[in-house]
Amino acid sequence: MGISRIRSARIVLCLIVVSLAGGCAHKGPKRPPVTGTRYPARISKPYKINGIWYYPLSTAEGYREKGIASWYGADFHGKRTANGEIYNMYAYTAAHKTLPFNTYVKVTNLKNGRSTIVRINDRGPFVRNRIIDLTYKAAKEIGMARAGTAPVLIETVALAYHDSKKKNAGWKIKKPPDPNIGNFCVQVGSFKFAQNAYNLKRRLSRRYPNVRVVTSLVGNSRYYRVRMCRFHKLSDARDALQEIWQSGFVDAFVVAE
């Protein structure tokens, strides 16, 4: 039952406990009590497993990933996870190598379309070609417990943050921003010579409002980029892009600011 997981850090910890306390074979209770305890914010630093360095992300906004999911169960039940919690194979949590702790993700089994939402509280799986390790409960819900693995899609559905200004503050959930709402522009051209950029700006301004020149440095080179801006919906920017393409500016594209 379960999937074999390579966890060098836990093996080292187990050996230390064996030498100090005389054993690490106890697998913990069948189902540890879930008290709803909230844990303080933890800085997830880069770490090294089996000679490979992993660099946790600073944000999970807009995160999507496809790959193979697996699950882990009784061998780790009742033991500590990477963020300090007690692992509960009957809870809706998961291990991921780089997503921030306490990020909530939707995991969809691409074979049957079933999905579940889990919270990231552990690191792994450190097995080639696997992207997430689910609890037994979550794996069962999406119909992959028996097979052990399944192709999945991971999508961020909520971000967790900790209010350090309040004593004993718990984790709060913040929905990620809608990627279709914001400040968008259509970049029509990019030039090394300012005069060329301003000539195009004057030409476009006769027909379109809110045309501007944005200066940026790329290495040691300065570029002058002509953009049509003030689109607050991605769909509006894409409509303007279609019109620009029809006017002959086939290299134009949408950018977010």
Image: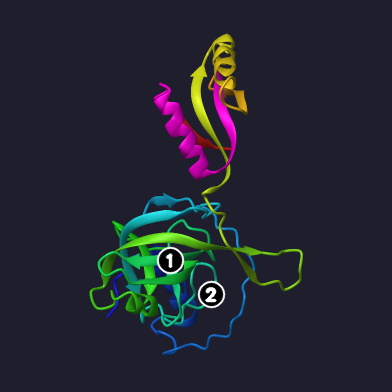
The image quarter in which residue 222 lies? top right
Tell me which segment is drawn in magenta. 223-250
Q: What percent of the width, then of the height, locates residue 204?
A: 55, 20
Q: Amino acid at mark 2?
A: Glu
Direction from residue 216 to residue 105 in the image, left or right:
left
Q: Residue sitting at 27 percent across and 67 percent down? A: 150
Pick the residue in front: 105 or 255. 255
Residue 98 in the image: x percent, y percent? 46, 56
Q: Earlier in the sequence, mark 2 or mark 1?
A: 2
Most foreground residue, 149 or 201: 201
Mark 2 and mark 1: span between their CA atoms? 21 Å
34 or 61: which is nearer to us? 61
Answer whether residue 211 is visible to the viewer in this image: yes
Question: Is 228 included in the stretch rendered in magenta?
Answer: yes
Residue 75 in picture, x, y percent from top left: 36, 79
| Residue 234 percent coordinates (x, y) | 51, 44
Q: Which mark is residue 106?
A: 1
Residue 107 horizontal side relative to residue 235, left or right: left
Quadrant containing the N terminus in the rendered view: bottom left
Labels 2 & 1 near each other (Cβ < 8 A)? no
- Find residue 159 and report its image quarter: bottom right
Would residue 49 be visible to someone looking at this image?
no
Height in image: 187 above or below 89? above
Above/below status of 233 relative to 25: above
Taking the spot 51% from the left edge, 38% from the top edge, the residue there is 237
Q: Residues within 10 Å of mark 2 (few under 14, many from 20)?
A: some
Tell me the amino acid under the disc marked 1. Answer: Lys
Q: What residue is rendered at 55% in x and 52% in y?
A: 58
**Residue position for label 2:** 85
Q: Secondary structure at mark 2?
A: loop
